[in-house]
DNA sequence: GCGACAG
DNA sequence: ATCTTGTCGC
C-alpha cells in the first residue's frame, strides 16, 4: 500500500513529545469507515541483540480469518524504549512493512495503546493519524488507567478510566485469563473496536492478527500458508 | 520525592 | 522486547 514515510524522526524525548502534542488533536474516535472486510495486524521484534528492529504486517480476511498477505521489514534500532514513546521506536519499521503490502487493509490492529496513553497518542493512534486509516490498540498490559473488577466470562469488558475520561476497555478475550487493554486508535469508536477485537479472537487470549504478526516479527513458529484460515476447522464450524 | 511504566 | 525453568490443563 502507498504510504508517506517521514525522512526524519524525533531524536529525543523532548522532540517526540512535541510531535505527540501536535498530532493528538487529529485523532478521531468515532466510526469513520465504510465496510471492513480485511484486517491487518502489525508488530515488532528484535534481532542482533536488539540493535535491529524487525517489523511484521499480516492481512486477514473477515470473518474467516484467512491469511491473505504478509510482509517483513528491518531497520537499525535508534530510539530507546521509553514508556509512552513506544511509537518512535517501532513505527518507522512498521510503516516499511505496511508499505510492502499489495492489499490495502480496511483496519489495522496494533500491539500497544491507542488513546489509552498519557497524551492520548499511543502507537495505534499515531499510526492511524499518520496514514489516515482506522486503527485499534490492543495491549497485553496496562500503560495507565484504573478499572473495576472484571467478570471472568469471555466477552466481558469494563471501561478503563484516566482523569475522569474513558480511555479504553479492559476486555476478557478468553474465560479465566488475563484481560486485554483495548483502546480506539483512529477513526473508530471504543464499542466498535471491542467488537472487531472479539471477531479476531475466536480461540486464544490474543487476536489472530496480533498472534500472526507477533510470530512473523519474532521468527518463532510456522505461519499458516497464505490463503488458508488461521484457525482450525473445528473452530471455523463454531463460527457458522 | 516516590512509585508506575504499552513493547 | 528477550531469556529461561518449571508447572498446569486439555
Image: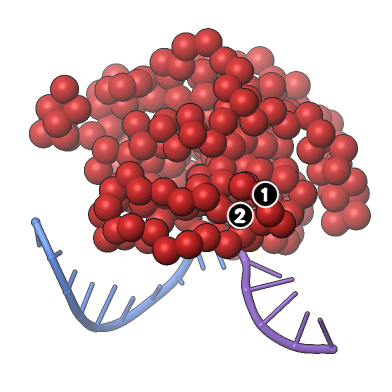
Chain colours: A red, B purple, C blue
Q: Is residue A213 above or below residue C3?
A: above
Q: Residues within 10 Å of mark 1 (few under 14, many from 20)?
A: few
User: Which residue is located at x 52 percent, y 24 percent?
Assistant: A107
Left or right of A52 in this view: A212: left
Residue A212, position in %: x, y? 39, 39
The answer to whether any part of residue A69 appears in the image is no
Give the quadrant of residue C3.
Answer: bottom left
Where disc 1 sits, the SS reads: strand
Image point 68% across, 54% down: which residue? A164
Return the mark for residue A165: 1
Nearest the camera: C5 or A160?
Answer: A160
| Relative height, residue A38 to residue A191 (above, below) | above
Q: Which residue is denoted by mark 2 in the rendering?
A: A161
Left or right, A23 with respect to A76, comes to right
From this view, report whether residue C1 is shown above or below residue A184. Answer: below
In the picture as drawn, the residue positioned furthest to the front comes out as: A164
- Residue at x 46% of width, y 51% of height: A158
Residue A154 shown left or right of residue A216 in the figure: left
Task: Report how far apart the C-alphas of labels 1 and 2 lie in the structure.
Answer: 5 Å
Residue A114 in percent (x, y) is at 62, 42
Residue A97: quadrant of the picture: top right
On whether disc 1 and disc 2 are found on a single subunit, the reply is yes
Vertical placement of residue A201 versus A148, above or below: above
Location of residue A188 in the rendering, given as x and y in whole percent from the top left corner: 58, 28
Chain of residue at mark 2: A
At x 38%, y 41%, the residue is A207
Q: Where is residue A161 drawn, in percent x and y? A: 61, 54
Amino acid at each position: 500500500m502507498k504510504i508517506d514515510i517521514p525522512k526524519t524522526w524525533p531524536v529525543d524525548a523532548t522532540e517526540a513529545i512535541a510531535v505527540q502534542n501536535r498530532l493528538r488533536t487529529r485523532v478521531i474516535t468515532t466510526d469513520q469507515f465504510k465496510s471492513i472486510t480485511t484486517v491487518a495486524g502489525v508488530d515488532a521484534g528484535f534481532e542482533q541483540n536488539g540493535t535491529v528492529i524487525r517489523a511484521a504486517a499480516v492481512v486477514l480476511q473477515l470473518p474467516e480469518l484467512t491469511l491473505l498477505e504478509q510482509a517483513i521489514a528491518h531497520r537499525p534500532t535508534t530510539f530507546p524504549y521509553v514508556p509512552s514513546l513506544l511509537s518512535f521506536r517501532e513505527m518507522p519499521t512498521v510503516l516499511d512493512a505496511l508499505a510492502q503490502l499489495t492489499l490495502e487493509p480496511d483496519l489495522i490492529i496494533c500491539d500497544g495503546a491507542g488513546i489509552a496513553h498519557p497524551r492520548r497518542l499511543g502507537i495505534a493512534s499515531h499510526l492511524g493519524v499518520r496514514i489516515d486509516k482506522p486503527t485499534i490498540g490492543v495491549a497485553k498490559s496496562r500503560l495507565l488507567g484504573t478499572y473495576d473488577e472484571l467478570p471472568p466470562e469471555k466477552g466481558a469488558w469494563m471501561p478503563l478510566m484516566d482523569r475522569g475520561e474513558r480511555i479504553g476497555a479492559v476486555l476478557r478475550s478468553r474465560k479465566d485469563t488475563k484481560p486485554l487493554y483495548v483502546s480506539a486508535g483512529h477513526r473508530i469508536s471504543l464499542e466498535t473496536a471491542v467488537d472487531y477485537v472479539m471477531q479476531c479472537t475466536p480461540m486464544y487470549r490474543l487476536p489472530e492478527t496480533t498472534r500472526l504478526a507477533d510470530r512473523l516479527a519474532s521468527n518463532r513458529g510456522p505461519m499458516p500458508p497464505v490463503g488458508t484460515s488461521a484457525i482450525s476447522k473445528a473452530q471455523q464450524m463454531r463460527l457458522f
